Image: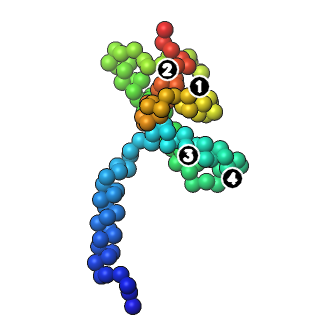
Amino acid sequence: MSYLPKSFPVALIAAVTIVAAAVPANAAMTVQTFLARANALRDQGPMALMSPDLPVLKAEAKAATTQLKADRAARAAAGKPPIACVPEGESVGIMDMLDGLSQLPAADQKRPLKDGYARVLAKRFPCN
């Protein structure tokens, strides 16, 4: 005997569909969300390697980096100056990037991760 109405599965599917449509699959993670999840992983110590959040955060970081490289190429093709002038062979380690992201003002931490990365790189490697 079921205590749920027969229409319950249909209503559940409709609700999930509405929620899924409201949040695009490729919605960019904000700096604030990324930092919160990264800090939670850091607090787990070695157990973080087993967390399902680790591959998610790695994918977000990779996507942001890929987008920044594409933006840089597009700016160069359009004759616009780069946002940051990272010397050839130079890179920013994950801990330095996390520190830079955490130092961003609260308003900037509400932006997509790619934009936060760009601001950190611009501050560290200005084009003056």
Q: Identify the residue position indicated by label 4 in the image.
A: 47
- Identify which residue, 14 or 50, lies in the foreground: 14
Identity of the residue drawn at 31% across and 52% down: 22
Question: Does 3 sit left or right of 92 as displayed?
Answer: left
Looking at the rendered structure, the kind of residue marked 1 is Ser
Identity of the residue drawn at 51% across and 28% down: 104
* Residue 91, numbered circle: 1
**Contact (CB < 8 A) between labels 1 and 2?**
no
Looking at the rendered structure, the kind of residue marked 3 is Arg
Residue 99 visible, this orientation: yes
Q: Which residue sits furthest front? A: 106
Is 17 above or below relative to 29?
below
Quote the CA–CA distance across marks 1 and 3. Answer: 23 Å
Quote the CA–CA distance across marks 2 and 4. Answer: 33 Å
Q: Identify the residue position indicated by label 2 in the image.
A: 122
Looking at the rendered image, the disc whose residue lies closer to the viewer, 1 or 2, is 2
**Contact (CB < 8 A) between labels 2 and 3?**
no
Looking at the rendered image, the disc whose residue lies closer to the viewer, 2 or 3, is 3
Quote the CA–CA distance across marks 2 and 3. Answer: 24 Å
Counting from the top left corner in percent of width and height, residue 37 is at 55, 46
